[in-house]
């Protein structure tokens, strides 16, 4: 049947979609609802008289959907909200025509070695209010422009932790560090204490290559045995 122009049940394709269809099937095609066919004779076929799902092969992704194919016949389809895994070209998917639109609901198989990608068109919330959420993998990578962790209790057990941070800020009421050795290397170090600073050690060694200054309203040096001051010059008073 020849079509002189789009009817109310037909959809006008965008320039990008027409280009994709022409690359796949040539210039002979018709549009029914949101489903594109290369053969007008298929317009009355049982494929669109039933809502039964059928298997398709993914040919390409578009800005507003994906291109599917059954054999050499291409179809335009949209991805259902429940299909969280993003289809890739070459995948075998299950799709159903609903109200003139072909919807991809499930990915059946993937022939390539591309990783599975979970895709959500809106915000994604994973919840286990009364259970435990476990992530297990050989390697875990998280990438985000902003991350917030709201945790009541955190237990980290690891062999090595390496962090490359531009600015690190810690706010809390108590900080306890129990380690065998502490090594701090920096160009400048500043500590501002409003009250008392206590240091308890067996031996204390301060070594300044240039100068050392102690300034206080009152300074006390007390030793049980010996106090030794050794220098080329000693100025007191």
Image: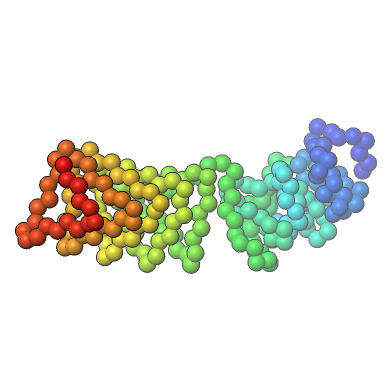
Q: For the point 57% across and 46% down, which residue is it?
A: 120
Which residue is at the front of the view, 197 or 230? 230
Q: Position of residue 10 (x, y in %)?
A: 81, 37
Q: How is the image coloured?
A: rainbow
Is residue 157 toward the left or the right of residue 51 in the image? left
Toward which corner of the image does residue 190 lie, by quadrant? top left
Q: Quarter holding the N terminus?
A: top right
Q: Quarter holding the C terminus?
A: top left
Q: Is residue 71 above or below residue 26?
A: below
Q: For the point 46% across and 45% down, which residue is it?
A: 147
Which residue is at the front of the view, 104 or 127? 127
Which residue is at the front of the view, 148 or 87? 148
Toward which corner of the image does residue 12 lie, by quadrant? top right
Q: Position of residue 82 (x, y in %)?
A: 58, 49
Q: For the point 44% across and 46% down, which residue is it?
A: 167
Q: Position of residue 9 (x, y in %)?
A: 79, 36
Q: Is residue 189 above or below residue 223?
A: above
Q: Residue furthest left?
A: 224
Is residue 49 toward the left or the right of residue 130 in the image? right
Q: For the point 12% across and 50% down, which residue is it?
A: 221
Which residue is at the front of the view, 65 or 175? 175
| Residue 37 visible | no
Q: Position of residue 218 (x, y in %)?
A: 14, 40
| Figure label count | 0
Q: Residue furthest front?
A: 233
| Residue 75 visible | yes
């Amino acid at each position: 049947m020849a079509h002189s122009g789009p009817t109310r049940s037909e959809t006008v394709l965008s320039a990008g979609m027409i280009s994709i269809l022409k690359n796949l099937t040539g210039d002979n095609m018709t549009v029914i609802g949101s489903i594109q066919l290369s053969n007008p004779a298929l317009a009355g076929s049982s494929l669109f008289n039933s809502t039964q799902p059928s298997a398709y092969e993914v040919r390409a992704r578009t800005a507003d959907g994906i291109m599917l194919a059954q054999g050499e016949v291409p179809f335009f389809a949209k991805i259902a909200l429940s299909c969280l895994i993003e289809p890739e070209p070459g995948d075998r998917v299950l799709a159903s025509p609903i109200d003139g639109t072909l919807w991809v609901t499930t990915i059946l198989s993937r022939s390539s070695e591309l990783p599975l990608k979970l895709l959500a068109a809106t915000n994604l919330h994973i919840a286990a209010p009364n259970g435990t959420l476990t992530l297990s993998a050989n390697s875990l990578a998280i990438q985000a422009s902003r991350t917030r962790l709201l945790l009541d209790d955190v237990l980290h057990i690891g062999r090595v932790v390496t962090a490359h941070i531009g600015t690190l800020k810690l706010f809390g009421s108590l900080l306890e560090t129990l380690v065998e050795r502490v090594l701090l290397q920096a160009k400048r170090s500043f500590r501002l204490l409003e009250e008392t600073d206590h240091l308890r050690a067996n031996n204390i060694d301060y070594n300044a290559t240039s100068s050392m200054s102690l300034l206080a309203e009152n300074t006390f040096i007390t030793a049980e045995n010996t106090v030794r001051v050794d220098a080329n010059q000693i100025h007191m008073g």
